[in-house]
Image: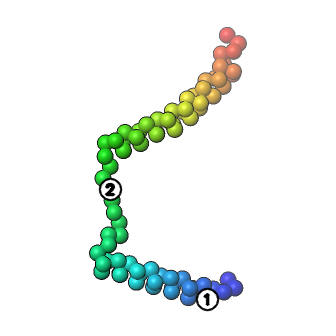
Amino acid sequence: MLFSKKATEVLEKQTERFEEREKEREKRGEITEEKEKLQLKDIFAMWIAAVITFVPAILLVCALFGFVIWLFFLRFI
């Protein structure tokens, strides 16, 4: 690489700055990872979104397979 030494130095400085900021946050008591509990409504909304997303795609693939089967095997009966 043309500027590999300089790039390495910049990455090391950024890493040091990031670690310093994280230490300051821990000292101040800020939580770095906040996790929220999913409510029943959230889970229900995710199920609805999954159904809306995947069911049409699955139906389209099944219809395509059915058409291919009809085209090759059942058309001449």
Q: Which residue is located at x 40 percent, y 80 percent?
A: 21
Dividing the image into 4 quarters, which one contains the N terminus?
bottom right
Label 2: few (<14), some (14–19) or many (≥20) C-alpha neighbours in 10 Å: few
Going 46% across and 39% down the picture, which residue do you hit?
Answer: 49
The amino acid on which the numbered mark 2 sits, given as a three-letter code, is Glu
Which quadrant would residue 26 be assigned to in this image? bottom left
Q: CA distance from mark 1 to mark 2?
A: 41 Å
Q: Between tags 1 and 2, which lies in front?
A: 2
Q: Quadrant of the C terminus?
A: top right
Residue 74 occupies quadrant? top right
Q: Are marks 1 and 2 in contact (CB under 8 Å)?
A: no
Tag of residue 16? none
Which residue carries the number 1 mark? 6
User: Label 1: few (<14), some or many (≥20) within 10 Å?
Assistant: few
Q: Which of the two residues, 47 or 31, is positioned nearer the viewer here?
A: 31
Residue 38 vs 72, above or below: the answer is below
Asked whether, in this view, residue 32 is left or right of residue 17, the answer is: left
Q: How far across and down, in percent of the image, does residue 14 sit?
A: 50, 82
* Position of residue 27 measured from the top left corner of the image (x, y, whole percent): 30, 80
26 vs 6, nearest the viewer: 26
Instruction: Tell me how many marks there are.
Output: 2
Q: Position of residue 33 (x, y in %)?
A: 35, 66
Going by the numbered disc 1, the residue's amino acid type is: Lys
Q: Nearer the viewer, residue 41 or 13?
A: 41
Does residue 32 appear to the left or right of 8 in the view shown? Answer: left
Q: Secondary structure at mark 1?
A: helix
**Residue that extends furthest to the top in the rendered view of this protein:** 77
Task: Say what secondary structure mark 2 lies in.
Answer: loop
Comes first in the chain, label 1 or label 2: 1
* Point 61% across, 88% down: residue: 6
Mark 2 highlights which residue?
A: 36
